[in-house]
Image (tube, rainbow, N blue to C red):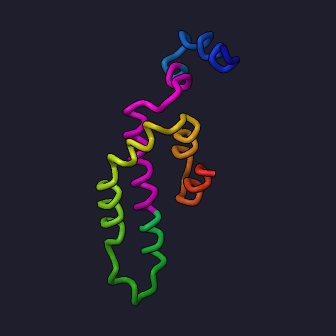
Amino acid sequence: MSPSARMCLLVLPLTASTMMACSAKPTGPECEAFADHIIDLAASTANAVEAEATASDVKAAGMADPVRQRGEARRAELIERCASSPRTALDCAMAANSLGALRACKR
């Protein structure tokens, strides 16, 4: 048995959060939260770009709504990707506060 597996078995009874940390794959609710987080990051990035747009680009207002709609359309794919990812990838993605930080999780 690996040292990390032994550690999980030792601390498993302590708290529910420890139990989640010891599981190999993310749970369904964690993947739902992951999808929400990714969609929110994409929409907030679109909002930032929109806020910096020049006067001639102002007619592109509402840019975040299409971004959020595309994200929602890909929600099932995001959840499926999360469910097959290691916990470390989920932890990195959930800590990301920008799309750049999210991209860094893939490295």
The residue at 39%/47% (across/down) is 78
Q: Is residue 28 left or right of residue 106?
A: left
The residue at 57%/56% (across/down) is 103
**Percent position (x, y) of residue 99?**
53, 59
Residue at the bottom extreme, as displayed: 56
Q: Quadrant of residue 51?
A: bottom left
Q: Is residue 94 left or right of residue 62?
A: right
Residue nearest the viewer, comparing 70 with 37: 70
The residue at 32%/46% (across/down) is 76
Q: Is residue 48 magenta?
A: no
What number of labels is visible? 0
**Percent position (x, y) of residue 8?**
60, 16
Residue at the right extreme, as displayed: 3
Q: Is residue 24 magenta?
A: yes
Residue 95 lies, with reference to residue 62, above or below; the image says above
Q: Which residues are magenta?
A: 19-44
**Percent position (x, y) of residue 85?**
50, 39
Residue 85 lies, with reference to residue 46, above or below; the image says above
Quadrant in the picture for the N terminus: top right
The residue at 31%/65% (across/down) is 65
Residue nearest the viewer, comparing 92 with 1: 1
* Prevailing SS of the magenta stretch: helix
Residue 4 lies, with reference to residue 73, above or below; the image says above
**Percent position (x, y) of residue 25?**
49, 30
